[in-house]
Amino acid sequence: MEFAVRPSTKSDLAAVDAVLARSYPKLLKHDYPPSVLVTALPLISKAQPALMSCGTYYVAEMPDGRILGAGGITRDRARADIGHVRHVATDPDHTRQGVAGAILRHALTRARDSGLVHIECWATRTAVPFYRAQGFDEKGPIDVPLAPGISFPAVRMTQSLSSPAFCR
């Protein structure tokens, strides 16, 4: 399958929204109870407009313009050498075809080139094997606050961009 990874723009918002809305409900249902998904999905299945034009968020795009996946890394506000993986998702019809891996490798390379040394990821339970295969190490479970009274169970994972495992 032929696709290109490029920086996202504000005009990609609707397409990324569609990918997230299709991906998360389908792919997360095996690892989370309905009671968690009913409150979390409306909050996590929307693209964040600020990410679309930040320069470090990317989309995988087919030659015909269809967006297959998205994801990126943002710099930590408190520590300039740390980055955070943000909203990596693939359309469920295109999983296991290299889309998310290509996006993440692209983002990690750009992150290292920009001076980031460590990357942190709050992975869904579903995505832990994917991030492990990309060289991330599990640090333990976390609850990600989404809104007052609503949190999402995730797994904290990290990667050093100077390690030999970087960008496998």
Image (cartoon, rainbow, N blue to C red):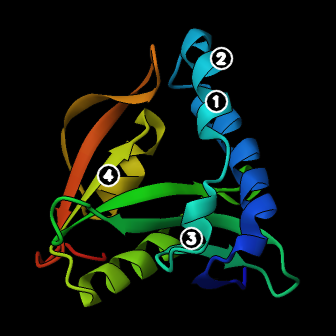
Q: Which residue is mark 1?
A: 41
Q: Which mark is in front, 4 or 3?
A: 4
Residue 80 coordinates in the image, percent (x, y): 18, 71
Question: Which residue is rendered at x = 47% and y = 38% of the image?
Answer: 126
The disc, 4 or 3, on the residue closer to the chain's N-terminal end is 3
- Residue type (three-letter) at the residue carrying disc 3: Gly
Q: Which residue is mark 3?
A: 98
Q: CA distance from mark 4 to mark 3?
A: 19 Å
Callout 4–callout 3 Cβ contact below 8 Å: no
Residue 118 coordinates in the image, percent (x, y): 17, 67
Q: CA distance from mark 4 to mark 2?
A: 23 Å
- Residue type (three-letter) at the residue carrying disc 2: Val
Categorize mark 1 by other alpha carbons within 10 Å: few (<14), some (14-19), many (20+). some
Question: Which residue is rendered at x = 45% and y = 13% of the image?
Answer: 149
Q: Which mark is in front, 1 or 3?
A: 1
User: Residue 121: which numbered mark, if any?
Assistant: 4
Question: Which residue is rendered at x = 71% and y = 50% of the image?
Answer: 92
User: Residue 38: which numbered mark, if any?
Assistant: 2
Which quadrant is the C terminus positioned in?
bottom left
Front one among 144 and 132: 144
- Residue type (three-letter) at the residue carrying disc 4: Cys
Question: Which residue is rendered at x = 43% and y = 38% of the image?
Answer: 124
Callout 1–callout 2 Cβ contact below 8 Å: yes
Front one among 9 and 38: 9
The disc, 3 or 2, on the residue closer to the chain's N-terminal end is 2
Taking the image as shown, residue 4 lies to the left or right of residue 156, namely right
Which quadrant is the N terminus positioned in?
bottom right
Residue 34 coordinates in the image, percent (x, y): 62, 13
The quadrant holding residue 4 is bottom right
The quadrant holding residue 108 is bottom left
